Image (cartoon, rainbow, N blue to C red):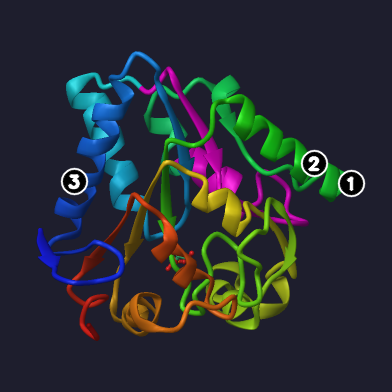
Amino acid sequence: MRPVPDQLIPTFVFDDRVELARVLADEVEQLVARPAGLVLGLATGSTPIDTYREFARRHRDSKLSFARVTTFNLDEFVGLHADHAQSFRRWTRENLFAHVDFDATRTHFPDVDARDLAAASRAYEDAIRAAGGIDLQILGIGRNGHIGFNEPGSARDSRTRAVELHPWTREDAAAAFGALELVPQRAVTMGVATILAARRLRVIALGVKKAGIVRETLRARQDSSLPSTWLRDHGDVRLYLDREAASAL
Ligand code: PGA
């Protein structure tokens, strides 16, 4: 782990993605052990997967228990059944919950099936607040600077809500869905302000495709056209990169 000095977000580069996962899992493990327990915000996809594998390994080999951890997922597509191969509910179940002893009554996803998405989104905010707020949010950055599905144009004070997906986001998802037309147009996401309210933000970016947005996140003028630039305002945020994602710094 190598710190990159003088960045607007404390930034660390790892030669090995598994080492990155271990550093983040060490922090989560310390928080899990606190008497107050842990409220953990979960991202999905290739970015956090090594970290979730590390959680599973520690549960299996060291009996680390997540039974008292409360989770809130960042976002979900609108229009997919919970069992759809590309839904984040299924992804999280298969890649994390199936391997670790989370208590299902403590895991939460944005309600994308509600008829009134605005009311369901307000209820999600209420549930986060009732749980005491998110202690640590695991986060990725999209190529277009999105955090969660807060696409370019998302306001800094936005809260959980239904959003239209950006063309790049749908393009990036097209391969997994099999065709661009199959990618949903909408999602429900925690808002920028919801994310910034987490006590700790641990942001991961991997691969050369993210090198440009990592540079912009750290250096571009703060603006809602690049929601990831708002991360610089957080008092306890760290950016974890592999060498490729750090290659434009
Ligand atoms: P990923 O990026 O899809 O490459 O994991 C994270 C994100 O878009 O939020």
Instruction: Provide the residue designation for mark 3.
Output: 23
In this rendering, the answer to whether 20 lies above or below 28 is below
Q: Would residue 64 be counted in the magenta stretch?
A: no
Quarter holding residue 68: top left
Distance from disc 2 to disc 1, alpha carbons, whole Å, reads 6 Å
Residue 178 percent across, percent down from the top left: 60, 73
Instruction: Provide the residue designation for mark 2.
Output: 120
Are there few (<14), some (14-19), or many (20+) residues within 10 Å of tag 1?
few
Q: Which mark is residue 116?
A: 1
Amino acid identity at mark 1 = Asp
| Element on which disc 3 rests | helix
Amino acid identity at mark 3 = Val
Of labels 3 and 1, earlier in sequence is 3
Residue at coordinates 39% horizontally, 65% vertically from top-left? 232
Of labels 3 and 2, earlier in sequence is 3
Residue at coordinates 57% horizontally, 44% vertically from top-left? 90
Amino acid identity at mark 2 = Ala
Q: Would residue 71 be counted in the magenta stretch?
A: yes
Are there few (<14), some (14-19), or many (20+) residues within 10 Å of tag 2?
many
Nearest the viewer among 157 and 169 is 157
Q: Which mark is residue 70?
A: none
Q: Magenta span covers which residues? A: 66-94
| Element on which disc 2 rests | helix
